[in-house]
Amino acid sequence: MRWEEEEFRKKFDVRLWGRLGRFAKPYTGSFALLILVMVVVGCVDAVFPLFTKTAVDQYMAHGTTDGLVGFALVYLGLAAAQGALVWFMIWLAGGVEQGLVHDLRRAGFDRLQKLSFSYYDKTPGGWILTRLTSDANRLGETISWGLVDLTWGASLMVAIITAMLVLDWRLGLITLAVVPPLAWVSWYFQGQMLAWYRQVKKLGSELSAAFSEGIQGARSAKVLGREDGNGLEFQEKAGRLRAAAVKSAWFSALYLPVVLTLGSLGTVLALGFGTPLVVAGTLTVGTLVAFAAYTVQFFEPVRELARVLGELQQTQTSAERLLRLVETEPEIVDREGADLASAAHTQVHGRVTFENVGFRYGPGPWVLQNFDLDVAPGTSVALVGETGSGKSTLVNLLCRFYEPTTGRVLVDGVDTRDRTQHWLQSRLGYVLQAPQLFRGSVRDNIRYGRLEANDAEVEAAADLVSASPFIRDLEHGFETDVGEGGNRLSTGQKQLVSLARAVLANPALFILDEATSSVDTETERLIQDAVEVVLRGRTSFLIAHRLSTVRRADRILLLEHCHVVEDGTHEQLMTRRGRYFALYTEQFLAEGEKRVLEAEA
Ligand SMILES: Nc1ncnc2c1ncn2[C@@H]1O[C@H](COP(=O)(O)OP(=O)(O)O)[C@@H](O)[C@H]1O
Ligand SMILES: [Mg+2]
């Protein structure tokens, strides 16, 4: 919510809109055409009262109907042409709107793919989502339809003013005296209406957030005796929402009567000063009728202009936020020349070295300091330690999801920053605790590891990690749709699929970060066996909660407060009878106890 409460800028920011220019550029032709069409539509709108004038002055005043059919046909033709133009304009502007929204989303999305992990630490997901949905929509809408309304309103106003002054400049000047107050009132009311409308929307979303919090937290609030406190907070929000809604309704209700009254003042002026002129014979009846029509017609473009300008000001906030996303530079970028070095360095042996590494997440406290580690090619390393001891941080640095603040991380003796991110990441297999699957079939999800792999290779990878039995049991086997984010599969199944994907990629380095901590013991055993096969001969980092999973690793590192406190094989660490021994026996006993209890039950 806090992120939403940014104030609207008051001033029109030319440079900001200039930065949006690159998004408008592909539509320059459409924009030009739209402007042309709207100028024509605006001018034609102003011509219709002149037809009335002609009918009155030429036919009624002279008591003749000669050529009336032709006159009517011209009128009809013009109205039809106007209709066709409006249809064309709506079609064109709709296309531009959709195109713009699409391009803005695309740009935002592409940027999100490039941004480093650190960006996601700082930016709430909800904020990003709003940029790509409502801000992109609002911008596309305002730019395309705003342009249409602005051009139409401005040209209709200019046309009406011109027509009035040409018909009778004195009467024109008198009648137009209501325009400045009309414009000011419209501007004021539109501004108030928009501001209150937005306020209502903002408070509304705050209230639904409070609602859902209240629903989810009802139970714990009860337990903690916080029901009353939550109720007060809710009541306060609901009260503010009601007040804002009343205010908004008040302005909306008042606007039309005020503007209409002001508009009739124009009509009164026209008739009041025009009628004597007609009586004196210096003004035709038709002209007076046209004037009366213009005074009524005038208020529409004034209202539109006020609305569009008000909206433009508010859209500026959307523009600013969306541009902030689109123009964020990733913190991790490839160095110059890294692409050439990477292209030449194809064979990776898998030596991993941390050299005097210091690291902190952004401005936070130091997580690692003077950290050294050397892992020989082909070694399987298990990282164990309590939550927060730095296991994930180590592998994040190895993957270059973050860069060390000081010191170096080396693969095969070269600084990973001297290679491209793609080089490193295409040589890394990474299986996370919460595996990411994509919409599509199981087969496609596995193939994502190496897009050029054929069906046989995909199935071989699944076999290797013992995923095949469960996959063949699915409704359509390998062709089964895994659903949004893979949610039609269980976590264990998702992990097997992502393991198969990693195997297919055949990486030199393998990382499993708590890949088995949320699956049942049986699946864990499956995965464990699979992992053994997969890791053979590769450098691997294995992070697991259950120590039984890691005992076969070549090297076990016990981390405490981001320092390696014990380092050796399972047997070595067990004979040392230190921290690892204590942890292991503790877990072993606890699990044994659980087994006994389960057996009894
Ligand atoms: N994205 C992050 N931003 C800030 N601090 C972090 C972030 N991730 C981890 N930390 C901090 O770094 C330390 C090590 O965490 P982590 O490497 O995740 O430990 P583990 O994986 O062993 O549970 C902890 O103090 C944790 O609070
Ligand atoms: Mg972790």
Image (cartoon, rainbow, N blue to C red):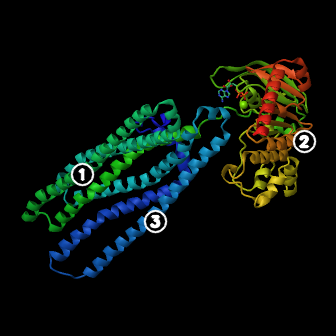
Question: x, y percentage for residue 149?
Answer: 39, 55
Asked if the residue at label 1 sits under 8 Å from ligand 1, the reply is: no
Judge by depth and name the residue closer to the eye, 546 or 199: 546
Task: Check disc 1 and give the amino acid type.
Answer: Val
User: From where the camera sits, is residue 384 visible?
Assistant: yes
Question: Within the image, what quadrant is residue 65 found in?
Answer: bottom left
Quarter of the C terminus within the rendering: top right
Question: x, y percentage for residue 292?
Answer: 19, 61
Q: Residue at x 76, y 51 (%)?
A: 445
Q: CA distance from mark 3 to mark 1?
A: 31 Å
Q: Nearer the viewer, mark 3 or mark 2?
A: 2
Q: Earlier in the sequence, mark 3 or mark 2?
A: 3
Q: Nearer the viewer, mark 1 or mark 2?
A: 2
Mark 2 Cα-neighbour bin, 10 Å: few <14, some 14–19, many ≥20: few
Question: x, y percentage for residue 375?
Answer: 87, 27
Asked if the residue at label 3 sits under 8 Å from ligand 1, the reply is: no
Residue 533, labelled with which disc? 2
Vertical order, 546 against 169 (above or below): above
Q: Residue at x 45, y 35 (%)?
A: 5
Task: Check disc 3 and give the amino acid type.
Answer: Phe
Question: Within the image, what quadrant is residue 338 found in?
Answer: top right
Q: Which residue is labeled 1 in the image?
A: 259
Vertical order, 344 against 281 (above or below): above
Q: Earlier in the sequence, mark 1 or mark 2?
A: 1
